[in-house]
Amino acid sequence: MRRCQPIGLFDSGVGGLTVAQEIFRQLPHEEILYYADTAHVPYGPRPAEELIHFATEITAFLVSQGAKMILVACNTSSSLALQMLQERFPVPIIGVVDPGAQEAVRITQNGRVGVLATEATIRKGAHSMRIQELDRSIQVIGQACPRYVPLVESGQYLSAEAEQASRLYLQPLMDASVDTIILGCTHYPYLEPSIRKVIGDNIHLIDPARQTVARGIALIESGLVPARDSRYGKPCHRYYVSGDLQAFRQVGGPLIGMHLLTDIRQVSLHGILDGAAPQLISATA
């Protein structure tokens, strides 16, 4: 591997930017290659077979663009496709489910953990299965949140609608007296203000982004993945979308800083698994 290769990461939309922000904070010399599958967001209602296909296409694209490791910055894709991706592709691939589950086991005091996630992630039950593997005494209460991702993708994560949705989704977890809640979708940290209004400050909220990036750091420190040489200059981050370029920039810019979204390209990955090249549709000027 070359010392100028980027870290690849992907999500259905802007949610994975929470993981990107952790990379900027913990690995400021590294470059990222981010893919937002905005043509297919939200992932939650879609069938597993379709989501696995999307994840495979995107991972193939990121590898073809030189990614030295990939963070699957999407709980739904991590739940459904992570093992298959790890077996199929030659670079290290890290998901977000296991880091969140391990952190929940570490910090819960009463053994009751809530999981807020998409419908597909809740159906798969990946967080619950992993937590049970680590500690069978812990009770896991899952809650699907179908309104959350569309609220974030439309820039309404601080709206009255977001607070209304939070009251609906969090009540079953509060009734179950959870002391820890995993934000089981990378979009959800942007909804923390509305979530905190409902649950107060005494329940732990876990955003797995920090622990996920820490696993990437461990691979770099071990020498399995090369660190980017700072002599290559300032990092130049690239963003790819499958849907509308300007919509991604309009929502994502306020989340991570418009100055970081200067290189966005809309591409089609149709046929990439059969050897076709990705097709550039549009790009920022």
Image: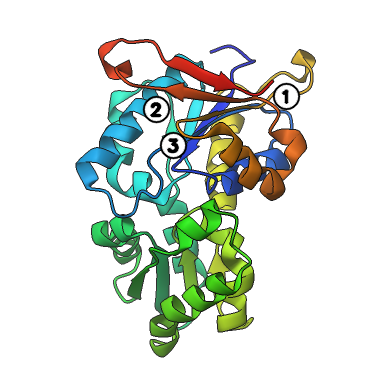
Q: CA distance from mark 3 to mark 1?
A: 23 Å
Whether residues under marks 3 and 1 lie with C-beta atoms below 8 angstroms apart, the answer is no
Quarter of the image for residue 101 reads: bottom left
Percent across and percent down for residue 253 are: 69, 43
Instruction: Name above or below for residue 238 compared with residue 179.
Output: above
On the question of residue 12 being in view, the answer is yes
Kind of residue indicated by mark 3: Asp
Residue at figure coordinates x 56%, y 82% from the top left: 198
Crowd tier of the residue under label 1, counting other residues whose Cα lies within 10 Å: few below 14, some 14–19, many 20 or above:
some
Quarter of the image for residue 192 reads: bottom right
The front one of 164 and 191 is 164
Residue, disc 3: 37
Residue at figure coordinates x 56%, y 79% from the top left: 203
Q: CA distance from mark 3 to mark 2?
A: 12 Å
Q: Which mark is residue 235?
A: 1
Horizontal relation, residue 98 to residue 201: left or right: left
Q: Secondary structure at mark 1?
A: loop
Percent across and percent down for residue 166 are: 50, 75
Q: Secondary structure at mark 2?
A: helix
Percent across and percent down for residue 187 are: 52, 54
Residue at figure coordinates x 37%, y 45% from the top left: 78
The front one of 102 and 6 is 6
Q: Which mark is residue 59?
A: 2
Crowd tier of the residue under label 3, counting other residues whose Cα lies within 10 Å: few below 14, some 14–19, many 20 or above:
many
Percent across and percent down for residue 15 are: 53, 49
Kind of residue indicated by mark 1: Pro
Q: Quadrant of the C terminus?
A: top right
